[in-house]
Image (cartoon, rainbow, N blue to C red):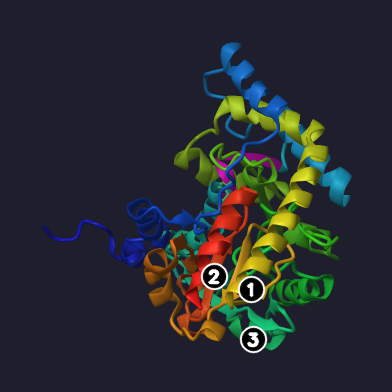
Amino acid sequence: MTEPLVERMREFGETVFAEMSALAVRTGAINLGQGFPDSDGPTRMLETAVDTIRAGECQYPPGPGIPELRAAVAAQRLGRYGLEYDPATEVFVTVGATEGVAASVLALAGPGDEVIVFEPYYDSYAATIALAGAERRAVTLRPVEGRFTFDPDELRAAVTSRTRLILVNSPHNPAGTVFTRSELEEIAAVCREHDLTAVTDEVYEYLTFDGTEHIPLATLDRMRERTVTVSSAGKTFSVTGWKTGWVTAPAPYIRAVQTVKQFLTFATSAPYQRAVAYALGNEIPWVEELRASLQAKRDRLITGLESAGFTTYRPQGTYFVQADIRPLGFTGGMELARALPGKAGVVAIPTQVFYDHPEAGAHFLRFAFCKKDEVIDEAVARLSRLR
Ligand SMILES: *Cc1c(COP(=O)(O)O)cnc(C)c1O
């Protein structure tokens, strides 16, 4: 049979996540590859979803999202960041941040357009840009003094007359960087100078460490008017399976995103929307505890990885640590990731799969620490055999 998959999607056929998770199952290895927590969100929020189903709220909700969730998102953006959005016209609910980003890119970029991403990038970005028929231009984040950052000249050099969008993920998966105000100023200056739209992915907005402040790009001077902000409940409330996200932006952008979203999924699951609206209003103290617990897990995993012989980069946010494999005598991250379940009974993700320039990430493995302490401890004990 000839390959049925359309040409532009062929490079996305087999994801490394599927391969590595299958390897974990086959070998009984501990899976520190995929980034999902192994405990669930706040009890009252979970019960609200159940109660909503029992109360019969099981038919199509409004396409833009239920008014309660749009109001809760608007209140969150205003209360936390001082950003004002009209819940009726400037807040829009999506099937997770994934659909929020996809609908935004599909609405705002097309064939002949270029989209700038920072590599290593979240894997859905590349596929979404390809679905839109646009082209991606990757600006590389490299370690400088212990954290991943970009060279402003490289960002400027990536802009062409065809550039339409810059996709900005901060806190950044998988590099762990939370962009500073001065890094964001560089991005904002490029957007203003070249009349570009920024699409920001802020799903880890609450999960930052050591007091690091998350600064939404939209809060910078003259950026609210050209920024489409995406976030979701999955990471904030440890419900990655709920797929409930939202977009905030000026009304013309929301109309554009809505035009696409209505034909992707039409609407987003009703019971989760009500539960997330409740949580945004009432469960931020729970999220603060989650943040503190994740910071301790980060430190636990880093201490273990360092004593096993890796060099690590301490992330300022997210679920992930980057580990340099070269001090252990390895050079190929892909090769080591495939061998790791056999050698040490642990699964990690080779960071090079998130690059257009894989040589820049060839010696990194990404480990997730959003796991129970016992799981982290057992993984670390196993990895100490690598020496
Ligand atoms: C997990 C993740 C997402 C997906 O969020 P959903 O709400 O589950 O769609 C998007 N972007 C980044 C950077 C992520 O880590």
**Which image quadrant is residue 176 in?**
bottom right
Cβ atoms at labels 2 and 1 below 8 Å apart:
yes
Count of number-bearing discs = 3
Nearest the camera: 68 or 234? 234
**Mark 3 packing: few (<14 Cα in 10 Å), some, or many (20+)?**
few
Question: Is residue 284 or residue 73 the one in the foreground?
Answer: 284
Q: In the drawing, does residue 247 fall left or right of residue 184?
A: left
Farthest residue, direction left: 1
Q: Nearer the viewer, mark 3 or mark 2?
A: 2
Residue at position x 55%, y 77% in the image? 138
Q: Quadrant of residue 47?
A: top right
Badge 1 or badge 3: first in the primary sequence: 3
- Considering the numbered disc 2 on the image, is that residue within a helix, a strand or a loop? helix
Residue tagged 2: 384
Cα separation, mark 3 vs mark 2, equals 38 Å
The spot of residue 290 in percent (x, y) is 74, 45
Tell me the tag on residue 307: 1
How many C-alpha atoms fall within 10 Å of the one at disc 2: few (<14), some, or many (≥20)? some
Q: Is residue 156 above or below residue 386?
A: below
Amino acid identity at mark 3:
Glu
Q: Amino acid at mark 2?
A: Ser
Coordinates of residue 330 in the picture (x, y in percent): 47, 83
Quadrant housing the N terminus: bottom left
Q: Which mark is residue 154?
A: 3
Cα gap from disc 1 to disc 3, whole angstroms: 35 Å
Q: Which mark is residue 48?
A: none
Residue 367 is left or right of residue 347, and the answer is right
Query: Residue drawn at (64%, 30%), measured in percent from left and top?
Result: 273
Give the spatial CA distance, label 2 vs label 1.
7 Å
Task: Say whether residue 297 is left or right of residue 33.
Answer: right
What residue span does the magenta drawing correspond to? 91-97
